[in-house]
Each structure stands twice: as structure tokens, then as C-alpha cells.
Image: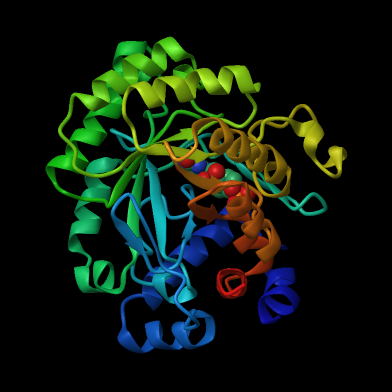
């Protein structure tokens, strides 16, 4: 209530990226002391019946995670467990540091409950993120069952556009994370819609080359692929067949929606805008693809469902469609941190039916 009716109207008057940076700085600060973590936990923590899940051998205290793109440099691992989250996907990180695309690169589409994202993979680079995560006291992450997955993308610059250079870019980050034993699982993000060279690895041939290179690196943790959500099923399924053949653990379904016609209020995003849509326009495309993937592949894949989780009901729809875990970002921005506790309660009620 406090967030939706008092804070949000104020925050939504400011530049979205400035608000995002403010939340990252504040969240990092709040994570540093026992007192502030406890205070946040009292307000936003989930302490109801057990809703933990074990997926690919990893225990999640709650099956709800912050999706990639919010905590891209890994500043928030100490505070996020205290708002009911069972984990987060840090990143996407890239081999080299990346400033991102020109500003403005985030636009709120209030009526459509969406954010137009043209961030361009701003991050400090994999080595800086590894150093930061290694410096966080582990009892504040693993000790309370909080899972830190890491999303890996290709550096958003001209040097990584040639295919072999792009593969080497992913491989560098994947190798470094494994060498340093940082991250509980890894996601290979092939579907960032707003970077140099586009979504090169969303064809079966190039995905095969990329995953062959990734599989050549010793890794004991689960590996997933972050999928695009605008491909027709036949093309989407062709990518799933490669992921299956290469023996990866599963898929994150999925990334931003590139179809501006799916907005509730089309006029909020003129054709001259650049970037992908988060939030409500993602709800149905992602849930449909989760359903079809589960139907065709049974239990073969772990499915992490993400896209347009704006309420407890839309989170439960992801499970009903076949997701094992659920991620979100935009719902948190529009509804506030209290949304996670509500979703956890809905999951507890669903389990007890
Ligand atoms: C500001 C912002 C930045 C994002 N950056 C990334 C990213 O770096 N890597 C990635 O895999 N997905 C990224 N995404 C996509 C989200 O992880 C998610 O797939 C998408 O927003 C749909 O979920 P939502 O409707 O809950 O926001 C980003 C989304 C937002 C809103």
C-alpha cells in the first residue's frame, strides 16, 4: 500500500534509470547491517508454510527469483533474500565492461504496465562481478538458501560481432565463472534484443556452435538458455532441439517482447522507439511457450518462467503452464516489493489445496 499509493507516484515522476540506480544503492546499503536486513525482513520477508523447491539439485527457499537485468553487477545479494525471494539472476554479465546504449534507454509505459528496455547490457564486466561476489560474506547468501544464478551475454560492442569472436566472448565469461566457482547456476542469454550484432545465436546452426563451445568447458552447475519469445513455435522448437541434443538443463522463457502491437496502449511506444517490452505484454507469449515446451518435452527441461508476472495470479499461471521456478522484474517496479510476499502466500495456499 505504502509503495503503490505513496512512493510509486513520486518515483514515477523521475527518470527510470535514476530510480533504478537509487534502489540499487539503497538496497546494497540496507544489506550491509543485520539491523537493516532484519527491518526489511519484518516488513517484506516471507515466513509462512514451506514453499521451498529443489530444482537441478539446488534448493530455493521460495521458487521466486529476481530476473536478469535489475542487479546486473551483483550488488543486492544480501538484501534480496529478505523480501521473500529465493534467488536472483545476476547480470547479464559480459566478457568486457559495457557502458550500454545511449540514454534514455528505459521508458515507462504506464498505461500498458510495461517498460521499454534499450539498456544494451550495461555492466562492469565478468571479472569485476566475480570480485564483488567473492567479497560478499557467504553466510548471507548460501546460508539462508538464497540462490545466485548468473546470466551471461555477449559484450555489446563491435569487436564481439563476428561469430567466432562472439562465441569466444561468451566462453570467456563462462570459463572465468567456473574457474572461480562463482554462481549457483548459469544462463546463456541469446535473446538480448538491443545490442550490437542483434540476436545472432537464435538460429539452430549458430546456437549449436555456441553450445558446443560452452559444453567443452568443465562445469558442475546447471546451465540454462534464455529464450526469445517472438519466434514462431517451429523456430522456437528448433532451438529447443539443439538445447536438448547438447544436454543443457533447461530454458528460461523468456526475454523481452519486440512486438509493439501487443501493448494495451499502442500509442505509448511509437515505431521510432527502440528496445524490447517488459511486463504485461510478455505475460501471454511467455506463458504459451512454457506450456508448449512442457507439453512437447515433458520433464526433459527445467523451465524458468518469466514475463509479465504482475500479480499472484499471473505467477501461478506460470506454474500451471509448467514452470519449475518463476522470475520477475517489472511486477516489482509497478507493484512494489510487497508483491513477492503476496505471491509466496498464493503459492502456499496452492500447495495446501
Ligand atoms: C531494465 C531491464 C533490463 C533487462 N536486462 C536484461 C539482461 O541484461 N539480461 C536478460 O537476460 N534479460 C534482461 N531483461 C529481461 C528480463 O530479465 C525479463 O526477461 C523481462 O523483463 C520479462 O520479465 P518482467 O515482465 O517480469 O520484467 C531486462 C529487463 C528489464 C526490465
For residue 308, side relative to residue 201 (left or right): right
For residue 131, side relative to residue 226 (left or right): left
Q: Quarter holding the N terminus?
A: bottom right
Residue at point 42%, 10% (across, down): 205
Query: Which residue occupies the foreground of this view, 255 or 76?
Result: 255
Residue 303 appears in the rendering: yes
Q: Height in image: 125 above or below 139?
A: above
Q: Height in image: 210 above or below 314?
A: above
Residue 269 appears in the rendering: no
Residue pushed farthest left? Answer: 179
Query: Which residue occupies the foreground of this view, 244 or 312?
Result: 244
Quadrant field for ligand 1: top right
Residue at point 44%, 70% (across, down): 27
Q: Quarter holding the C terminus?
A: bottom right
Residue 217 sits in quarter: top left
For residue 62, side relative to residue 288 (left or right): left
Residue at point 47%, 17% (across, down): 200
Amino acid at each position: 500500500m505504502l509503495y503503490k499509493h505513496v512512493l510509486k507516484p513520486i518515483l514515477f515522476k523521475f527518470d527510470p534509470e535514476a530510480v533504478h540506480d537509487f534502489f540499487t544503492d539503497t538496497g546494497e546499503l540496507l544489506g550491509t547491517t543485520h539491523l537493516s536486513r532484519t527491518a526489511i525482513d519484518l516488513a517484506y520477508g516471507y515466513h509462512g508454510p514451506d514453499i521451498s523447491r529443489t530444482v537441478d539439485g539446488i534448493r530455493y527457499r521460495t521458487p521466486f527469483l529476481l530476473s536478469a537485468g535489475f542487479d546486473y553487477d551483483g550488488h543486492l545479494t544480501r538484501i534480496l533474500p529478505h523480501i521473500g525471494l529465493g534467488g536472483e539472476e545476476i547480470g547479464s554479465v559480459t566478457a568486457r565492461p559495457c557502458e550500454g546504449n545511449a540514454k534514455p534507454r528505459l521508458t515507462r509505459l504506464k498505461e500498458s504496465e510495461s517498460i521499454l528496455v534499450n539498456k544494451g547490457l550495461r555492466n562492469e564486466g565478468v571479472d569485476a562481478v566475480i570480485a564483488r561476489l567473492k567479497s560478499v560474506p557467504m553466510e548471507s547468501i548460501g546460508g539462508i538458501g538464497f540462490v545466485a544464478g548468473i546470466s551471461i551475454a555477449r559484450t555489446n560492442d563491435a569487436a564481439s560481432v563476428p561469430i567466432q569472436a562472439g562465441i569466444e566472448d561468451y566462453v570467456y565469461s563462462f570459463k572465468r565463472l567456473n574457474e572461480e566457482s562463482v554462481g549457483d547456476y548459469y544462463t546463456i542469454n541469446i535473446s538480448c534484443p538491443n545490442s550490437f550484432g542483434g540476436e545472432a545465436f537464435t538460429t539452430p546452426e549458430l546456437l549449436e556452435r555456441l553450445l558446443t563451445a560452452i559444453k567443452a568447458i568443465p562445469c558442475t552447475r546447471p546451465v540454462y538458455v534464455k529464450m526469445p519469445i517472438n519466434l514462431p513455435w517451429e523456430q522456437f522448437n528448433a532451438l529447443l532441439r539443439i538445447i536438448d541434443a547438447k544436454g543443457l538443463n533447461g530454458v528460461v522463457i523468456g526475454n523481452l517482447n519486440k512486438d509493439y502491437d501487443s501493448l494495451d496502449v499502442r500509442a505509448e511506444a511509437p515505431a521510432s522507439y527502440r528496445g524490447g517490452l517488459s511486463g504485461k505484454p510478455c505475460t501471454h507469449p511467455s506463458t504459451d511457450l512454457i506450456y508448449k515446451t512442457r507439453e512437447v518435452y515433458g520433464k526433459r527441461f527445467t523451465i524458468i518462467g518469466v514475463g509479465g508476472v504482475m500479480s499472484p495470479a499471473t505467477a501461478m499461471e506460470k506454474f500451471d503452464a509448467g514452470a519449475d521456478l518463476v522470475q520477475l522484474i517489472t511486477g516489482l517496479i509497478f507493484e512494489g516489493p510487497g508483491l513477492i510476499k503476496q505471491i509466496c502466500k498464493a503459492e502456499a495456499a496452492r500447495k495446501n489445496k
